[in-house]
Amino acid sequence: MTRNLSILAVLAAVVALPFVFRQETGVREWREGDPVLVVITPMNEAIRHEYALGFSRWHAENFGSPVKVDWRNIGGTTEISRYLTSEFVSSFRAWWTAQGRPWRGDGAAIILSKSFNPDAKPGDVDEADWAEQCSMYAAFRGTDDPQAFSSRIDMYFGGGAYDGDSATRQGLLVPAWAPEEIPPGLLATDAGAELIPPGMSGEVWRTPTWYGTTLSTFGICYNRDRMLAQGMDRDPEHWADLADPRWFGTLGLADPTKSGSIAKAFETIVQVQCRHAVEAAGFGPMIDDYELRIAAAKLAPGQMPEGVPEEYQQAVETGWMNGLRLIQKIGANARYFTDSASKVPLDVGMGNAAAGLAIDFYGRFEAQVSNAGHGRESMAYVTPRGESGVSSDPISLLRGAPRREIAQRFIQYLLSEEGQKLWCYRVGEPGGPQKYALQRFPIRRDFYPSDNPVFQAAHERHRAHTTEDMSRPSLDAYRLAEEYVYRPRWTAGHFGLFRDLVRAMCMDAGKELRMAWGEIVARGGPEACPRAMDALQRLPLEPEPLTWTSGLALGRKYDRIDLLREWTIQYRAQYAEAARLAREEGGTRR
């Protein structure tokens, strides 16, 4: 009998343990019948955990019930785009054919087209066919009703401005509110001071269909111990530093076709080289004036209006090519390309890679973890000053969202002071994260130093609780944004091309690239092997020569898979040629 009572006591204690040690959230647990919100995202587990918990608590306090956030984490932005377009096409097709209307073989291309213009009928399309295309396009773009068609997902959280704009142009996103319905105090104070600007220095931070929630920069993470082993005793400060042959075989890089953030970093490298070339040509002081004139003239790409010299555009194009060649050299120094952008700083921290490109919060977090308890800073992260834009990660409402009202509240929470605290507060601070320090830049202006006394007072209040001091110039996102001006005309239209070109140039032909670069480095470097470098750095010639101008249209004129295949074949051949020429013209192999 005593033994049975002992067993029962132990069982009771085991059952009670979860309740004894359960962390008090301040709200009751979610129950069947409470609201659910379905969100697709590339965000990591730490962000998903903290924002699900924080939003549920906020919703319970403000609307009386907790919310279960059903995260759909299927991969990066490329996988998310494919999934959403597939779901929307399937759902729309079922709705369309249920009305007795035939489905066209090109139906998906029509409804998702980023350039379809109902007022511009192509000459080779007859009236009846065009009317059918316009009707289908208008039905998709004009319907926002989950009872008609839907992806069955409410929101898209994460990615970047490119991904938000791309989804908007495909018709996947809709405004959360009409302009006059945006909740007061969300984007500006009652006095009219902007809390969340539309953008800064050429970068877009919000649009009618998506809102930036957190800010990011891009930079270089590096391991000083590994650097010394490579013969380098100076920390990298600029993107171009990663082209140094002494990095050969040691850089960790991520696949830009899998990570929108890393794709943005590669675009930034090209953008910086455009600026350097323009400044070297003597046009630095005239950039703003010239770009305004070009925008106002609305000429064909590459054509200059009166008062803007052709040499200015030539400098932009020279910088553009220099940027691609710089990326090629960085890729030639790579040890690997990974599908996961977060793997690079992990490897750098462990010494498996000497350096790599990193999103700021991954780089800073891993440096803090790796250096803990060592008494020295073996790993470090740097945002190249004046060479990295400040971009935003958006939240958006999907067309036909089944739970629109809850989704609107999620946006409201993310942009509120309460929601923004989670990005930068220390674990356990009042209003801060419960388990993970996210260490990211909030987007709201009142978290940073400011001449506005109200914003400055808020900054000082937050400063006591944040993981890092955002009054430091290197951590003040608004100051960093002022130091780098993004010129969309120079590179934005090539964003998708850069992703595929880097894949062909540095990944699919990566083995051949590293072999050629290794031969060049071993025989005295680029200066000793000019013919080999010329062969190495040729831009693709087929299906047509790649230039600044042609690159704007290649994606529309040719199938993406065919382009990748053709470019890869060309690069493999020219890398083999470069290796042969290096052996012929270089010195004795070191």
Image (spheres, rainbow, N blue to C red):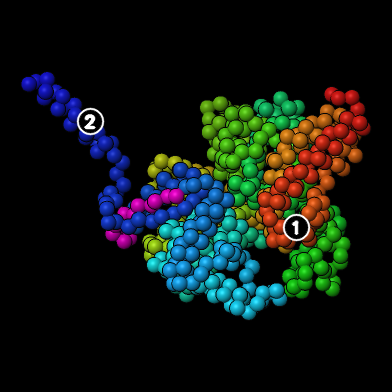
Tag 2: Cα neighbours inside 10 Å, few (<14), some, or many (≥20)?
Answer: few
| x, y percent for residue 157 | 49, 54
Q: Does dot 1 land on a helix, a strand or a loop?
A: helix
Q: Quadrant of the N terminus?
A: top left
Q: Residue furthest right?
A: 585
Give the residue at mark 2.
Answer: 14
Query: Which segment did they paint magenta?
Result: 61-72
| x, y percent for residue 147 | 39, 67
In the rendered structure, does residue 404 fall within the stretch colored magenta?
no
**In this view of the protein, which residue sits in the foreground, 277 or 460?**
277
Q: With 61 as the anchor, is 194 left or right in this view?
A: right
| x, y percent for residue 106 | 59, 64
Tag 1: Cα neighbours inside 10 Å, few (<14), some, or many (≥20)?
Answer: some
Give the residue at mark 1.
Answer: 551
Three-letter residue code for mark 2: Val
Q: Nearer the viewer, mark 2 or mark 1?
A: 1
Q: Quadrant of the C terminus?
A: top right
